[in-house]
Image (tube, grey):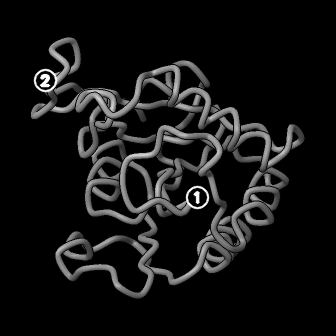
Amino acid sequence: MTAAIFLDRDDTLISNGGDLGDPAAVVMLDGVITGLERLSSMGFELVVVTNQGGVARGRYGEKDVELVHERLQQLVGETTPLHFYYCPFHPNGTVAEYAREHPWRKPAPGMFYAAAQQLGLDLSRCWVIGDQHRDMDAGRSAGCRTILFSRPGTRAEERRKDPDHTVKSFEQAVEIIRRAESDG
């Protein structure tokens, strides 16, 4: 069984203050591409796990989410493959087909379990990097180690779920993982 880094998408990998369904608006955050390359070279699978409630709210469709993910992969490069899992459901959605809770919607760990089954992952060897308490909760529920990416302006409420580590940059998260793996 192998290990993975579970990555939240919005405001962890890409700059996005809200719902994003336009691939032309994808902007990588500083240090992410290099950091992903380092994590991949360490033997980790890279798994993006993202709530996409904008689908349920009718702001964009699932095809738009897939196009954003294609653009993200283009920016990262084909030599650093990403696996994408997303949840289009939201209990307050306006599109009937998606207007409900779902086991894949973080803070539930459904996307983590699906990826583990499909990719043969040992969740106890996996890490989560995200910018929200729901990312930490989902990772902890799945048995992963957690890193909260807390940039200036992150509300205190979003930091309430004691992650294993808190960082201010993607590079710091990568270094924590590198050190832990070399010590382990």
Q: Residue 91, image x and y in percent?
A: 11, 31
Considering every residue shown, the one lying at the far top of the view is 97
Residue at 16% in and 30% down: 93
Q: Which residue is mark 1?
A: 13
What residue is rendered at 33% in x and 27% in y? 88
Q: Is residue 184 above or below residue 62?
A: below
In-image side of 82 versus 60 (left or right): right
Measuring 45% from the left and 21% from the top, which residue is drawn there?
Answer: 62
Neighbour tally class for label 1: few under 14, some 14-19, many 20 plus, Cα within 10 Å: many
**Residue 184 appears in the figure:** no
Query: Depth check: 143 or 155 in front?
Result: 155
Q: Is residue 123 shown above or below 61?
A: below
Q: Using residue 57 as the reference point, say whether residue 142 is left or right of it.
A: right
Q: Residue 141: where, in percent of width, then height? A: 28, 46
Crowd class of label 2 (few under 14; some 14 to 19; many from 20; radius 10 Å) = some
The circle on residue 132 is none
Q: Residue 100 got which mark?
A: 2
**Residue 171 location in percent, x, y?**
68, 76
Q: Residue at x 22, y 19 (%)?
A: 98
User: Is residue 167 at all visible to an observer of this figure?
Assistant: yes
The foreground one among 184 and 44 is 44
Instruction: In this rendered view, identify the residue nearer to me: 51 or 63.
Output: 63
Tell me if residue 133 comes above or below residue 154 in the rendering. above
Residue found at the very far right of the displayed protein: 79
Disc 2 marks a residue whose amino acid type is: Arg
Q: Is residue 136 above or below residue 9?
A: below
Q: Distance from label 2 to label 1 (Cα)?
A: 27 Å
